Structures are given as structure tokens and as C-alpha cells.
Image (spheres, rainbow, N blue to C red):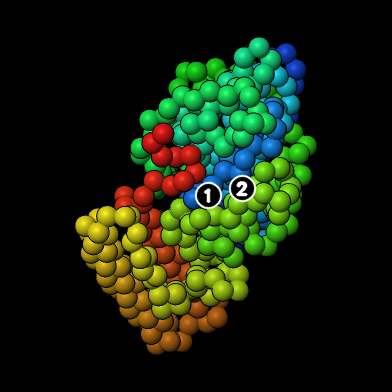
Amino acid sequence: MRKLLSPRNVLFALIVFALSAAISTPSQAQIRISVGFGPPPLPVYEQPICPGDGYLWTPGYWAWDADIDDYYWIPGTWILAPEVGFLWTPPYWGWADGAFIFYDGYWGPEVGFYGGIDYGFGYFGEGFVGGRWDGGHFFYNRAVLNVNVEVIHNVYNERVEHTVVNHVSFNGGPGGITARPRPQDEAAARERHIGPVAAQTEHRNAARGNPELRASANHGKPAVAATARPGDFKSGAMAAREAGGEYTPHASRGAAPGGNAGGAHANHPHDLAPIERITPNTGNAKSDKKYQEQQDKLIAKQNKEREKLQQQQEKEHAKLAKQNADEARKQQVEQRHQQQTEQLEQRHVQQRQQLQQRYSPPPARGGGKK
């Protein structure tokens, strides 16, 4: 596990295959993936209309691909429930033992813990308020789900108070959601459940093969954020309205063309791209002005910290030259400099994301007050 801290690796490791708890039948193996840096914020997007009776909404999320050393977006989509009475517990990323761990989603009679992540559309961090099973039919809550009542008649309208919107996509760690499982969440995990169905696996594979869905290419604003049916990225697909917050590809990996990160060559602060200023658009002029002032102050502080680290590293270079150090020693120092730069940039990105979150307007992804 020490490999997770290597500055020249993407910090990926497959660390455990664990069988999920089962009562009456075995469930699918749950795969946990460990990554050294967190996923982008959740994008803001509209929900496609439900394609038919019995389809349940499965929120979009960021997945990890070790082959490309990058996160990629799996669009939210409607999926036919595998069994009457089953609901979907979304996957989530959590911080544990110095790394981000992926916990896969599952189907079961109750919605369990999904990290407290606000996925929208009835998944606001705890449980699910988008619908319920009754008499062998799923009834849709039109207050949070996009349903055509001329096609689907088993609907109801139950207003949901949800005014605090959070685009953070992981639980725990620096800047993450602080939620913990409730007793009912733990009970749900012990009930009989099954993993993602074949349609979800095919949907994930299609997303994995689409370069536009990679975080280093779309910077947290995927061209396909949600689809009406799994695997169909054209008919009824919805593009992200905006990114959920600032995202810069991690300095330990090369950014895709057009990326704004220093990539694999960001060994020193001067190799990093200039900090991008976000134009505030909260709909409130006073709030926009306050955000702009705090953003300017934060960027000025971060630029000073960059310069301080740059000067420190330059002094070490001069010392190496004076000592006529060999190549092995120079390489060792360069690796340490790259790690220092990565850690600085990751901390700075998290600080800017947290500032933006405080001034983000409610999104149109089922996350506002209904």
C-alpha cells in the first residue's frame, strides 16, 4: 500500500474483493478500488423523462479507470428494477486509510448508505424520496422525478424540503461529506441484495470507452450527464448544465489535450497552470461581489504559497549544483519536489471548491426546494 504515495504513479491499487452480506441468496462480489486523489464535484444536469413504468432512476457518478489513469463520468440513467420491491442504493467514494475507496451500489428492498452524497432526484444524502413500491407497482414522486403522467399513471406529488445543495462527490477526508451510516442504513446492508444488473454494467462499459466522459477532458462538465435509457448516449441524452465546482486534473497524471493542469511535468509550482478565476453567477449581485472578493483574496494567498514553495525548491537545486550531486540524488530530489507540488495543488483545488460551494446556486437536478 505504500505505492499509493508514489509521486510517479497514479496511486491506484485493487485492494480487496469482499463478498457482500447475504441472507437468502449470495450477492455479487463487491469491488473496492483505492485511489490517491478524489473525484471531481458532481455536475449539474437535468433528468431525462422516465421511459416507462417500472424504470427506476440511478444517479450518475464518477468511476475510476486504471488503464487511462483517470476518473470518468457514468451518466445517470433509468433502469428496470430487477425485482418487484427492489430499490437502488447508489455507489459512492469514501476516504479511508489515506486513500479514496469506491463502494459499489446494489439493489435491495431498502436504500442503504451511499456516503451522504447529494445525488439529487430523490437521493439527497439519506434514503430515497423519489418513489415507493405499493401493490407490486412503483409509484413515482413527481416532485423530484421527471415523469410523463400520460404514459405512467401510478404517481403522486409529495413536496420535499431540500434547500442545502452540495456537489461534493465523496465521503470523509479533506473537504468530504461527514455523514455516517444510520442504524437503518446498516440494516439495509445486511438484507438480501444484488449488485448492478447487466444493463448497468453495459452502461458503465460504454461510458468507460467514451473519451469525452473522462474528467481530464471535460473538467467536471460531461457532454453526456444523463440518459433516458442505459447505453444510449444520443437519444434523450442530457448534457451537464455546468460543473459542480472547479476541477483540475491531478498533477501526478498527464492531462488530456486542452487540459488545464500541469500534468506529469508539474514537478514545480511554476509548471502549474495559472489559477483560473470563476465568474460568479448566483443571481444575487451582492453575493456575487462577496464571492469575487473572497476568491481574489484566496487566489492571492495561493499564488504566494506557490511562489514560496518554488523558491524553496530552487534553493535545493542550487545546493545540488554546488555539491555536484549525481543523477540518482537529483532524481530523488525531483521526485520529492513533484510530490510537494502535487500536495500543494490538491489542497489549493479543495480550498477553491469549498469557497465555490458556499456560493453555488441550487441546481436543476432535483436538488432544490420542491
Q: On the image, numbered disc 2 is attached to which residue?
A: 226
Q: Secondary structure at mark 2?
A: strand
Q: Residue at x 39, y 87 (%)?
A: 322
**Is 284 placed left or right of 342 in the picture?**
left
The local crowd at label 1, few if under 14, some if 14 to 19, many if 20 or more residues have their Cα within 10 Å, is many
Q: Which residue is mark 1?
A: 45
The quarter in which the C terminus is drawn is top left
Residue 62 visible within the image: yes
Report the front residue among 311 and 186: 186
Check the image and report above or below for 292 versus 357: below
| Residue furthest out toward the front | 150
Q: Position of residue 142 (x, y in %)?
A: 53, 30
Compared with 304, 364 (above or below) is: above
**Residue type, mark 2 in image:** Ala
Q: Quadrant of residue 23?
A: top right
Is 100 situated left or right of 346 in this image? right
* Residue 63 in sight: no
The residue type indicated by label 1 comes to Tyr
> Whole-percent x and y of residue 88?
62, 29
User: How far apart, in angstroms, are the residues tagged by discs 1 and 2?
Assistant: 7 Å
Q: Is residue 103 left or right of residue 348?
A: right
Q: Residue at x 43, y 68 (%)?
A: 341
Residue neighbourhood size for the residue with mark 2, other residues' Cα within 10 Å, grouped as few (<14), some (14–19), many (≥20): many
- Where is residue 273? Give x, y as percent: 44, 75
Q: Are marks 1 and 2 in contact (CB under 8 Å)?
A: yes
Compared to residue 219, the image places residue 14 above or below, namely above
Count of numbered circles in the view:
2
114 displayed left or right of 298: right
